Image (cartoon, rainbow, N blue to C red):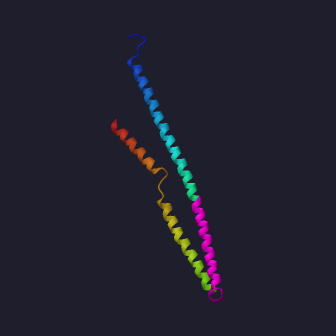
Amino acid sequence: MSEDTPGPATNLLRSLVHLGGTLLALLQARVDLLTTELSEDLERGLQILLWAFTALLCGILGALLLGVSLIIYFWDTHRLAAALSVTGVFLAVAVWAGAILRRRLHEKPRLLDASRTELHRDVELLRRDR
């Protein structure tokens, strides 16, 4: 074999370096995709939170003004009953919403749970193929 011709060890090393570069490029693409998805989800979540806060604030103000209007309407005849009824409705809605919130917090999936599951499947497939 002449000195200019690469041997099998050199070809193997080149192949390994090429494979490593390909794996790094694949990893970089996955990380870029993940960061893009996370930033888009964060932006979308913030927008949803802002609109939910706006809707909640307007709903609270509307319900409060409706309650005050009912109390004013019944001021001469049944002011205490009207005030207690409005208060009872507000408290009932608060308890109902708190129960739903508690249930939703306990149902919350882990962050990136689907991505983790897929990565575990990939690792298991790679281990079986050996």
Residue 75 lies in magenta, yes or no? yes
Q: Position of residue 86 (x, y in %)?
A: 59, 79
In the rendered image, which quarter contains the C terminus?
top left
The region drawn magenta spans: 50-78
x 50%, y 37%: residue: 28
Is residue 62 positioned above or below 13 on the image?
below
Residue 113 within the segment the image draws in magenta: no
- Is residue 41 placed above or below 71 in the rendered structure? above
Q: Position of residue 59 (x, y in %)?
A: 59, 69
- Please determine whether, in this image, residue 71 is positioned above or below residue 102: below
Q: Nearer the viewer, residue 80 or 98?
A: 80
Quarter of the image for residue 82 reads: bottom right
Seen in the image, is 102 located left or right of residue 65?
left
Check the image and name the residue furthest to the bottom: 77
Quadrant of residue 76 within the rendered picture? bottom right
Could you tell me how many numbered marks the image carries?
0
Q: What residue lies at 61% left-to-right and 76% top-to-bottom?
A: 66
x%, y% of residue 116? 44, 47
In the picture, the quarter occupied by the N terminus is top left
Q: Is residue 129 left or right of residue 112?
A: left
